[in-house]
Amino acid sequence: MRLQINVMDRVLIAAPEGELDHLHAERLKSQIDAAFEKSPCKHIILDMKRVSFMDSSGIGMIIGRYKNVEKQGGQLALANMSETVAKLFEISGLAKIILRAKTLADALELIGGGYSA
């Protein structure tokens, strides 16, 4: 799994590519956490556009990032989810606590109040 990270003002945008499963979740978690700690960011957007598969390890990784961001007074949003990942997001109950957006620009608007991609 590859990960691209960008920072836009106080928003860290993490874009994983590949399968978000038990083999990759821990490494992804570590990379996102390290980038978040080193940045001035308050919020995280996970751009799921290139995630082809996600299992319960991916859900755990997302919940952990949600808790980290919440401690900083920020928000976590997921953008560009495939239909399969969106279904898992709904079934897991994450949709009740984590913001979801169709596009990265929409996610930036939700958490940043006016940023544009």
Image (tube, rainbow, N blue to C red):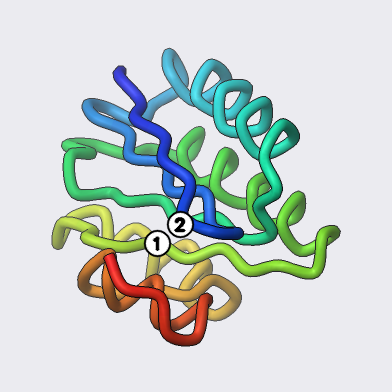
User: With 80 as the anchor, is 115 left or right in this view?
Assistant: right
Alpha carbon distance from label 1 to label 2: 6 Å
Find out whether the residues at labels 1 and 2 contact each other: C-beta distance under 8 Å: yes
Q: Quadrant of residue 90?
A: bottom left
Disc 2 packing (10 Å; few <14; some 14–19; many ≥20)? many
Q: Secondary structure at mark 1?
A: strand
Q: Amino acid at mark 1?
A: Leu
In what quadrant of the picture does the N terminus appear? top left
Q: Nearer the viewer, residue 108 or 25?
A: 108
Which residue lies at the image location 41% right of the left edge and 40% below the top edge? 6
Q: Which numbered disc, 1 or 2, marks the residue that appears first in the sequence?
A: 2
Please tell me the numbered disc located at residue 78: 1
Q: Please, is residue 11 above or below residue 18 in the view? A: below
Q: Amino acid at mark 2?
A: Ile
Q: Secondary structure at mark 2?
A: strand
Q: Quadrant of residue 110?
A: bottom left
Which residue lies at the image location 46% right of the left edge and 55% below the top edge? 8
> Where is residue 71 drawn, in percent x and y?
85, 59
Q: Which residue is identified by label 2? A: 45
